[in-house]
Amino acid sequence: MKSNDIAQTGMIAAVYAACTLMTMLFLGNLAWGPIQFRISEALCALALFTPAAVPGLTLGCAIANVANIALSGTGALGLLDVVFGSAATCAGALFTWKLRAHPLVALAGPVIANALIVPAYLPILLTATGFYTIPFTSISLDGAYPLMYLFGLVTTGAGEAVIMYVLGYPLGRSLARAPYFRGLSPFADESSVGSGTHAGLASDSGSRR
């Protein structure tokens, strides 16, 4: 890995972790609970531009989830979120990078990964933090794993979709207009603007891919 990629990975990890911790502090359970709007997930749009976003987002997610163990009081069970939550972020970002030529499809990666993986361990964390029924219902979590998984599949997926397409997609298009990202942009109409001025960046992008 080149030094520039290492620097990008570290920067993305730091920004993701900081944004997630801010969300945890101000929005509480909305950052990790049964209904999730983790605003920092919009940064998965960075995987449209650079492969360094894949390890960067994964590392940032792991750091934030480790911090959440102390903030939410999940104890050792919080390691489930560290391992599997970070794996979901990694899978989603990798999907986005691989399908970056089709941004709208690529941004579905984090939605699918989080919707399938996070609800698999979420009931355990919810029980550990004082949730004993499926949110908004009187159905006990004890023995209701399939229902809770289905609930999490819908709510986690919906929340992630809102973040990725309401925040992430506009973020990607905005970054595509910036000189640094323009030559790396998967948005054809944006990358063609000023192509004469930024031909060097485009050729450098081609060599990196």
Image (cartoon, grey):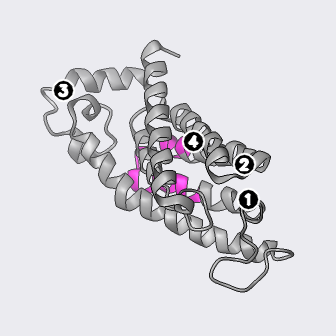
Query: Where does residue 44 sit, x and y in percent of width and height?
Result: 46, 45
Residue 155, located in which quarter of the rendered image? bottom right
How many angstroms separate mark 2 from mark 4 (CA)? 11 Å
| Mark 3 nearby-residue class (10 Å; few <14, some 14–19, many ≥20) | some
How many C-alpha atoms fall within 10 Å of the one at disc 2: few (<14), some, or many (≥20)? many
Work out how far the residue at label 4 is from the one at label 3, CA to CA, in angstroms. Answer: 36 Å
In the image, the segment drawn in magenta is 93-112
**Residue drawn at (65%, 69%), measured in percent from left and top?**
152
Secondary structure at badge 4 equals helix
Task: Tell me where residue 26 appears, x and y as whole percent.
Answer: 45, 56
157 left or right, relative to 66 = left
User: Residue tagged by mark 3?
Assistant: 198
Q: Which residue is mark 4?
A: 64
Label 1 with label 2: CB-CB less than 8 Å: yes
Which residue does the image show at 65% across and 48% down from the upper left? 85
Q: Position of residue 171 (x, y in %)?
A: 32, 49
Mark 3 and mark 1 residues within 8 Å of each other at the beta carbon = no
Q: Are marks 2 and 4 in contact (CB under 8 Å)?
A: no
Q: Is residue 99 visible?
A: no
User: How far apart are the two marked residues, 3 and 1, measured between alpha carbons?
Assistant: 49 Å
The spot of residue 24 in percent (x, y) is 52, 52
Q: Tell me which numbered mark, 1 or 2, is placed earlier along the sequence.
A: 2
Choose the circle earlier in sequence order: 4 or 1.
4
